[in-house]
Amino acid sequence: MAKLPKKEELLQYNYQVPATDWMDTPVEFKPGTYCYGAKGKNLEAVGFPNARDWSPSEEDWKLPEDWKGTVLEGIADRLSKYRSFRLFMDICVRCGACADKCHFYIGSGDPKNMPVLRAELLRSIYRRYFTTSGKLLGRLAGARDLTEEVIKEWWYYFFQCTECRRCSVYCPYGIDQAEITMMGRELLNLLGLNTDWISGPVANCYLKGNHVGLEPQTIMSNIEIMLEDIETITGKKIEPRFNRKGAEILFVAPSGDLFADPGIYTCMGYLMLFEQIGLDYTMSTYASEGGNFGFFTSNEMAKRLNAKIYAEAKRLGVKWILGGECGHMWRVINQYMDTWNGPADFLEVPVSPITGTKFTNAASTKMVHITEFTADLIYHNKIKLDPSRNDHLRVTFHDSCNTARGMGLLEEPRYILQKVCNHFYEMPEETIREKTLCCGSGAGLNAGENMEMRLRGGFPRANAVRYVHERYGVNVLANICAIDRAAFPALMNYWVPGVEVMGVHELLGNALVMDGEIERTMDLRMRPLPGKGDDDDV
Amino acid sequence: MKIWAPLLAVLALVIIAWLGAGVFEWTSLFGIIIPYTAFAILVLGFIYRVIKWAQSPVPFRIPTTCGQQESLPWIKQDKIENPSKTWEVVGRMALEILFFRSLFRNTQTEKREDKLGFGSSKWLWLGSLVFHWSMLIIVLRHLRYFLYPVPAFVQGLEKLDGFLQVGVPVLYLTDVFVVLGITYLFLRRVVIPQVKYISLAADYFPLFLLLGIATSGILMRYGLKVDIASVKDFAMSLVTFKPQVIPEIGTIFYVHLFLVSSLVAYFPWSKLMHAGGIFMSPTRNLANNSRAVRHINPWNYEVKTHTYEEYEDEFREKMRKVGLPLERE
């Protein structure tokens, strides 16, 4: 991994444009800004083409024979399959409204990270081979030849886009760079060009059921550790059962929550909540991933990974599905799952067994977001909360790109936060809700080797966190996304030390008053609660 | 090159019209054949492009949600920014198309040392709105040449447009605004370095062409006056398909007409098709209801998956050890 630059060095950039036209400015593979290339065995595991080991820093990318024909055919195929693609290739007027909306542009100043220019990387090829003006006028019409250099440039910049859709909010025609990036990545995948950090989890998820590659026994032992901690904290022994047939609800979380700090605390929050309300649920080791890194490779791969959720719900005979806190997982569930793998006619329209609320907004997918579920519980006074247990925390909320702009789940988590903690502060308006700034690590970019780029992409968000940190003393960045939980700790450490990262259900777990629990003296991280119990030595 | 080539191209068009209609007096060509052809290209080209887009399906329901979703009954949905029903989508689209809603959100990012600031930035929105609305009113005003009798709404529009009552003939506000709008849109392309960096010749060409059209039109009205009655007779002859060239009309009229013909013929093959495209943009024109109603992908196909049986086969022993239920012992 490249050494991390100091903050001052990292901030030595500006928004001046290079002297040379972008078509004449070659891409520079600077260590720290890009991911390792996909490994052959991981591509092979899921049957992706041109499986071989390769490195982006080497001159020879080992492209397949007739790679050019493959790419051009790939473009033609996708133009005929996606109206979004064809339209977005045609109607951009280059007004530049999107330019300074991208966190990677804001944090790096590289003009090719302006969404409009990132799109032009592909548009210029579209014009050259698919439009008359481009064929006749060439460069004057903004067209250029497809060369290996172009492929490298695509790879560099399409894996410097987190598919966050912020540009699309501001575009007068709704042109969505995420859509263009997805097409670009599909084309690259036809040549076996992906990143190690994406193709590894994809292979894991396909074979083992989750991105992090947890085998069933490891999931169980991880859960065991969480249960022990819950017992220490609350005095309650919980026994969730996995792969259980006949449960009412299948609960699917992002595997990050089963795996590591701080996601596991969010998972403990889920488990405590379900125990307290006596939910008849099960989790699955087979469908142990709500997230979908396949979504960062190709539509087909995403569908193949997603298929497990419905398949497992059917096998276990549950009535409906509840989904955990995860960002792109919910873009996929909200906008893709039913279309890919539905109809889920073997399930029932979700009804909360506790409140009787019918989730008609999920009538077809039969899958409910946990913050919808929990907000409903709280609204109907079905759980008892003691928000003072979070009094030492000053909390702000980061909207995940996908739940904000691919779903509109804005108030549900806020409602929960307002009920489980007494000190909640919003970041500035231009940086939250549909205008939320990305963590800079989404869409499979949360690797280690590209840390400089992640820090840059995360800088705009960190800047807003710093604002509330300095102004209100905010020390917790709450979120509903496993990638956020994985990515933000490093980012906060670098940009805004003193701010911790917590899932909404971790905070809920702290505040949740469970029947028969012991007096709480610790939070879910087993740290003493100030003002509670015998640790309070005043 | 990106600026000069389109500027020269537009100047060439002006000269072509001036020479052709003024010097060589090919008035039938410039008055009848070219306008008819150009208009036909516009109509057929526009339809062709829209059909081409429509031929590609919308496999997934991908609205960009810009507000609260419809969920629990006590959470207030933002029906315009995150519509879940058709009429709400209509509302969202109307705001986009008539008032450029998304552009209204525009902000400007500034970096001051180690801090970022996000300021409001409405100039692009205002400039675009002024340009597009002026353009629309001007086009509607032009209906007075093509309709007999002139409809009341066109007369009303003219009155409104000239309400300042300055000069003879009365100054139309939209004439001023359209030039201001085009000038603004041009200036920001050359003055803002980032916008200049992304601009193509295809971005300057329509601006120069529109400026040429506006200038020639304004010249005709306020300067090199043309015989309005003849223009009307000529326009009526075109729309009634009994085309008749009227020799007395000044050359400037042919320049105007030729530039308009160039614009409409260019329209369907250019970025100007954003006018049609915005109606079809899947991130804006779809309801966010794909959890409630199944969206169908016409080319959805079966894929190979890793089944539970395969999974259990691989991990059976390990699963048994930790007490997980098995399908096959």
Image (tube, coloured by chain):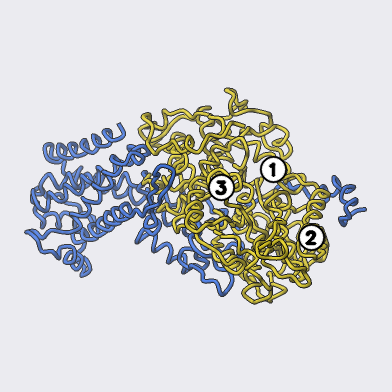
Residue B275 x, y percent position in the rendering: 36, 53
Q: Name the quadrant containing residue A510.
A: bottom right
The yellow-tinted chain is A
Residue B146 x, y percent position in the rendering: 21, 59
Q: Residue at the top extreme? A: A59
Q: Residues within 10 Å of mark 2 (few under 14, many from 20)?
A: some
Compare marks 3 and 1 and give the one earlier in the sequence: 1
| Side of A254 where B128 appears, left or right | left
Q: Which chain hosts label 2?
A: A
Q: Which residue is mark 2?
A: A232
| Residue type, mark 3 in image | Pro
| Residue A201 badge | 1
Nearest to the observer: residue A252 or residue A481? A481
Contact check, label 2 and label 1, Cβ < 8 Å: no
Q: Is residue A532 above or below residue B134?
A: below
Residue B200 x, y percent position in the rendering: 35, 38
Tell me the distance, in whole angstroms, between the alpha carbons under discs 3 and 1. Answer: 30 Å
| Residue type, mark 1 in image | Pro
- Element type at marker 3? loop
Marks 3, 2 in one chain: yes
- Element type at marker 2? helix
| Residue A497 badge | 3
Which hue is chain B drawn in?
A: blue
Q: Residues within 10 Å of mark 3 (few under 14, many from 20)?
A: some
| Side of B244 where A471 appears, left or right | right
Can residue A78 be seen in the rendering of this structure? no
Count of residue discs: 3
| Residue type, mark 2 in image | Thr
Q: Residues within 10 Å of mark 1 (few under 14, many from 20)?
A: many
Nearest to the observer: residue B318 or residue B59? B318
